[in-house]
Amino acid sequence: MTLTYIYAESRAVLGQIATFSEPHAYDLCERHASRLTVPNGWSVERQISNGEGPGPSEDDLMAIADAVREVARSHQEQVLPTSAAQVAQVGRRGHLRAVPS
């Protein structure tokens, strides 16, 4: 979880882990977050987590997968020879390739 202090209101806010770096925010493990204490006169606001961590949505993940597939397809088209004559000249064995001089 991420701990942020609001000094003007004498309040500490403990919420989901931040997705960006903030100079006055502190990331805490679950153990330390549960044991948090604040100075006398301060209050602690614990934001309830819905169990989902920060991260990309399902649409974002599908867009990334589609982009990777597209790059793989274009790479295969460039690597594979286009004619039978080229296949006869280039010998392949696993990841190694013998290219005639």
Image (cartoon, helix red, strand yellow):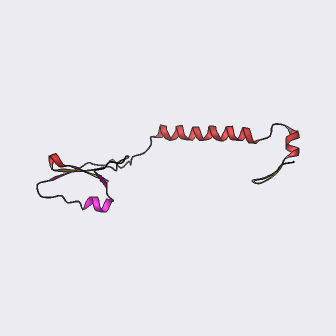
Q: Is residue 92 above or below residue 75?
A: below
Q: Quadrant of residue 70?
A: top right
Residue in view at x 37 percent, y 46 percent: 20
Residue 83 coordinates in the image, percent (x, y): 84, 37
Is-magenta flag for residue 48? no
Task: Say whether residue 55 is left or right of residue 62.
Answer: left
Is-magenta flag for residue 41? yes
Task: Say whether residue 45 is left or right of residue 78.
Answer: left
Q: Is residue 92 above or below residue 58?
A: below
Residue 24 coordinates in the image, percent (x, y): 28, 50
Bounds of the magenta span?
20-47
Frontmost residue, 29 versus 8: 8
Give the total of numbered labels. Answer: 0
Task: Say whether residue 39 is left or right of residue 83.
Answer: left
Residue in view at x 44 percent, y 40 percent: 57
Task: Say whether residue 100 is left or right of residue 22.
Answer: right
Residue in view at x 12 percent, y 58 percent: 40
Residue 6 coordinates in the image, percent (x, y): 20, 47
Residue 51 coordinates in the image, percent (x, y): 35, 50
